[in-house]
Every structure is written in structure tokens, then in C-alpha cells.
Image: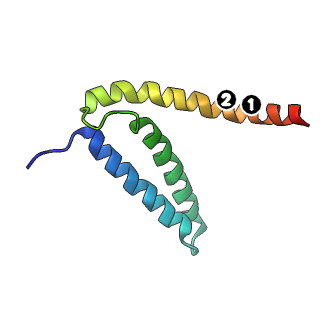
């Protein structure tokens, strides 16, 4: 049996986690499960953005070498978005 490369496996796991997040958000019985689903969906989506830019044939070491700089860039973009949005909104008024 051929073993899938690390990054290809992570892609599959992240898609499953995103779908699980949607299911938890969609249930209407428990607010705690809703919040957990929202966190799960957000975290898995951000990780998928980074892993989506890593070729699926990369092994663990090569993938992690690219993952952390990608996550840093994503974090910078999100922080800039949170900081600049109110300022740009105020400028437009």
C-alpha cells in the first residue's frame, strides 16, 4: 500500500475539519457546540489557506519549512485588516 505524502493527508484532514465545523455551526441545540464549530471552522480554514499553497507531494520537513512563513504572512494580513478597517471606515465618513 502506498502511503500518501504528509501535505496531501493534511489537506484531507483540514477539509474534514472544515465540514465538521459547518455541521457544528448548523446544529440548533447547543450554543457551546456552535461556538466550538465556529472556532474549528476558522482555525481549519486559516490552516488550509497556508497548506493550500504547499505542494501536496511535500514531506513533513519541507511542508513545515513553508507552513510557518505562510502562517506569518496570513497573520500579518489578518492583523492589518483588523487594525486598518476602522481607520479606513473613519476616513470614508
- Taking the spot 54% from the left edge, 32% from the top edge, the residue there is 74
- Taking the spot 45% from the left edge, 55% from the top edge, the residue there is 18
Quick one: 81 or 53, which is closer to the camera? 53
* Residue lying at the far bottom of the rendered structure: 29
Secondary structure beneath disc 2? Answer: helix
Whether 12 is drawn above or below 85: the answer is: below
Alpha carbon of mark 1 to alpha carbon of mark 2: how far?
A: 6 Å
- Image location of residue 59, percent across then percent down: 24, 32
- Taking the spot 34% from the left edge, 29% from the top edge, the residue there is 64
Quick one: 70 or 38, which is closer to the camera? 70
In the displayed structure image, the side of residue 66 where residue 59 appears, left or right: left
Residue receiving disc 1: 84
- Taking the spot 64% from the left edge, 31% from the top edge, the residue there is 79
- Image location of residue 12, percent across then percent down: 32, 50
Q: Residue 57 shows which numbered tag?
A: none
Q: Are marks 1 and 2 in contact (CB under 8 Å)?
A: yes
In the displayed structure image, the side of residue 16 where residue 34 appears, left or right: right
Residue receiving disc 2: 80
Q: How many residues crowd mark 2 within 10 Å: few (<14), some (14–19), many (20+)?
A: few
- Image location of residue 41, percent across then percent down: 51, 53
Q: How many residues crowd mark 1 within 10 Å: few (<14), some (14–19), many (20+)?
A: few
Number of labelled discs? Answer: 2
Query: Residue 6 lies in what quarter of the image?
Result: top left
- Image location of residue 8, percent across then percent down: 28, 43
Query: Residue 93 lies in what quarter of the image?
Result: top right
Secondary structure beneath disc 1? Answer: helix
* Residue lying at the far left of the rendered structure: 1
Quick one: 39 or 59, which is closer to the camera? 59
In the displayed structure image, the side of residue 6 where residue 2 appears, left or right: left
In the displayed structure image, the side of residue 55 where residue 89 appears, left or right: right
Query: Residue 16 lies in what quarter of the image?
Result: bottom left
Amino acid at each position: 500500500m502506498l502511503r500518501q505524502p504528509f501535505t496531501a493527508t493534511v489537506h484531507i484532514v483540514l477539509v474534514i475539519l472544515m465540514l465538521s465545523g459547518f455541521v457544528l455551526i448548523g446544529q440548533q441545540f447547543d450554543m457551546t457546540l456552535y461556538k466550538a464549530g465556529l472556532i474549528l471552522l476558522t482555525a481549519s480554514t486559516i490552516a488550509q489557506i497556508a497548506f493550500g499553497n504547499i505542494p501536496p507531494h511535500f514531506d513533513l520537513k519541507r511542508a513545515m519549512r513553508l507552513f510557518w512563513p505562510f502562517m506569518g504572512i496570513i497573520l500579518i494580513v489578518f492583523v492589518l485588516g483588523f487594525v486598518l478597517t476602522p481607520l479606513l471606515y473613519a476616513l470614508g465618513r
